[in-house]
Each structure stands twice: as C-alpha cells, then as structure tokens.
Image: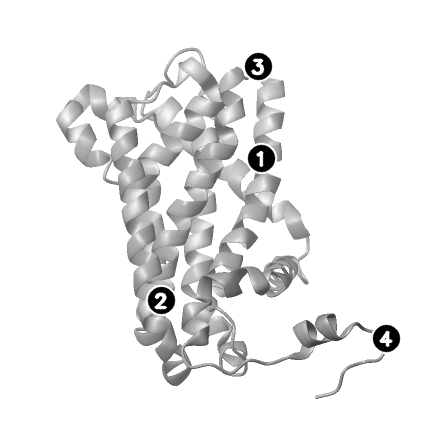
Amino acid sequence: MSIQPDMPPAEAGAEFDLILEAGRAEKNYWHDLWRYRELFIILALRDISVRYKQTVIGIAWALIQPFLTMVIMTIIFNKVAGLHSVGSAPYAIMVFAAMLPWMFFSSALSSTSQSMVGNANLISKVYFPRLIIPASAVVTSFADFLISFLILIGLMIWYQVVPSWHILTLPLFIGIAFLAALGPGLLITALNVKYRDFRYIIPFIIQFGTYASPVGFSSSVIREKFGEKIFILYSLNPMVGVIDGFRWAILGDNSPIYLPGFVLSLVIVGLFLVIGISYFRKTEKSFVDII
C-alpha cells in the first residue's frame, strides 16, 4: 500500500489504511452513518433527479397534485358535507395545512417501501449502512414537501392570513413528520425484501389513511361528535398528532391542539421508530442473500 509523497504520512494513512476486524462493521454502524454521509446525499439527489426526469411539466407535479386534491376535499367536506374549520381560518388553508404532512408521509412511505428492492445492485456490491437507503428516500419526499409549501404561502397571501408566533414551531413538527414517516418506512421496506406482497398493501394503507386521518376535516369534529375517549383511541393514528401540530403552527389559536391526544400520537411515533429501526437492523444482514 503506497503513500503519496505530497501527503503527510498520518493523513495518507488515515485515507488509505484498511482495518479488518471481526464485528467492526456492527460496532461502528452508527459512526459509519456519518462517514457515508456523501453517499446519503448522492442517493437523495439521484432520486430527486429521477423523479422528474423526462416528465412533461417536471416539478410542477408537486404543485398541481396537492392543489387539486385540496380543491376536491374542500368541495366535498366543506360545501357538500357542510363541515367547517375551527375559528376563523379559511377551510382551504385548514385542509392544505393538513395535506402537507400527510402527502409527505404517504410519499415517503411509498418510496421507502421499495427503496431496498430498487437498490438491489448497490446493496449486493459494496458495504455501507443500509439505513442510508430508506432515509434518503424520505429526504426525496421532503423535497416535494418544500415545493408544495409554496402553495400554502400563496393561499395565505390570497386569504390575507398572517401567521402568529406559532409558525416558529413548524420545524419541530416537520421533524416529527420525518420520524413518523421513517419508522413505518424502515419496517415496511425490511418486510418488503422478504415478502414482496407489501408493495400491494401500501397503496391501500395510503388510500385508507387519507380519509381516516383528519386531512379533509378538523380533528375536533371527532372529539365533539364521539367524545374524548373515542378521540384518544383515534389518536393512536400517529398522523393525527402530526397534522394537528402542523395546523397549530400555521393557524395558531384557530386550530388548537388537544394535548392528551397529541402526546399519545407522539408516543406512537416513537414506538414505530424504535420498532422500525430494531427490525431493520435485525434483518439487514440477510438482505443481500434474499434480495
């Protein structure tokens, strides 16, 4: 193993020395996540590029889809069903404030579920922490979230809605949404490696969750009609707390948070994250043999 003359021996050794040690990959797994951060960035940028490559209108899809969905939900739930938003917030903004985290979650869940199978060639050729692949898929969906956020800004300008100080907490709820998507995503992508049937289950989960989660209506409707005990059970859906958090950050007191339900949703988010990471780490050693 040669050392280039224009480099100090210490630096050259740090760059080119290869240490072989039993169990080293397992022992340094979390440290390797940071060491392979460039691969994480490359995979995320590649997925973003592929998503809009050879499309007619490119990233405009990230604007058109949520906007049309918001219009349809506003018509169905507000005009037809006669539901109203809490406080003085326009119904369209209330719906879109919920659609941002939901579409991020559904897109991330769909992307991560196929991420390991889609990168089978990469997995079988070189070592790196496999957790990088589903995590980069979540980041790819976050790019769509940022684009769609432009619609929310436009709606707030159109309806002349001025955000309160609550908007400063939005990064916190974005982080919670990221974890809410990552936990189930890790679990499902690991299961999908062994059981390919899961690729058919995900669309059903997303479709069912769109109406089971308070996207087109305020969660307070559930609490008012069925009582607090039923709402606590309803909050077992982790996206209830995430959506309520987004609405509170964007609409302020026009969309208050029911604290017991929100805390329960956070607990479920954390539980799914622990289960997802544990199962993924337990099964990733067999990915190369199965995939």
CA separation in Å, label 3 and label 1 = 15 Å
Position of 49 with respect to 222 (left or right) is right
Q: Nearer the viewer, mark 4 or mark 1?
A: 4
Residue beneath disc 3: 162
Q: Among all residues in the image, which is located at the extreme bottom? A: 1
Of the residues shown, which amino acid type is indicated by label 1?
A: Phe
Question: Residue, x 67% and y 52% (percent of image)?
Answer: 58
Q: Among all residues in the image, which is located at the extreme top? A: 88
Residue beneath disc 2: 281
Q: Quadrant of residue 83?
A: top left
Q: x, y percentage for residue 105?
A: 43, 46
Front residue of 265/96: it is 265
Residue beneath disc 4: 6
Is 286 rendered above or below residue 151? below
Residue 90 seen in render = no
Pointer 2: residues within 10 angstroms few (<14), some, or many (20+)? some
CA separation in Å, label 3 and label 4 = 59 Å
Question: Residue, x 54% and y 52% (percent of image)?
Answer: 139
CA separation in Å, label 4 and label 1 = 49 Å
Q: Nearer the viewer, mark 1 or mark 2?
A: 2
Residue 117 bears which disc, if any? none
Q: x, y percentage for residue 254?
A: 41, 14
CA separation in Å, label 3 and label 2 = 45 Å
Residue beneath disc 1: 149
Pointer 4: residues within 10 angstroms few (<14), some, or many (20+)? few
Q: Nearer the viewer, mark 2 or mark 4?
A: 4
Mark closest to the chain's N terminus, 3 or 1 = 1
Q: Secondary structure at mark 1?
A: helix
Is 89 rendered above or below residue 93? above
Is 188 rendered above or below residue 209? below
Q: x, y percentage for residue 135?
A: 48, 57
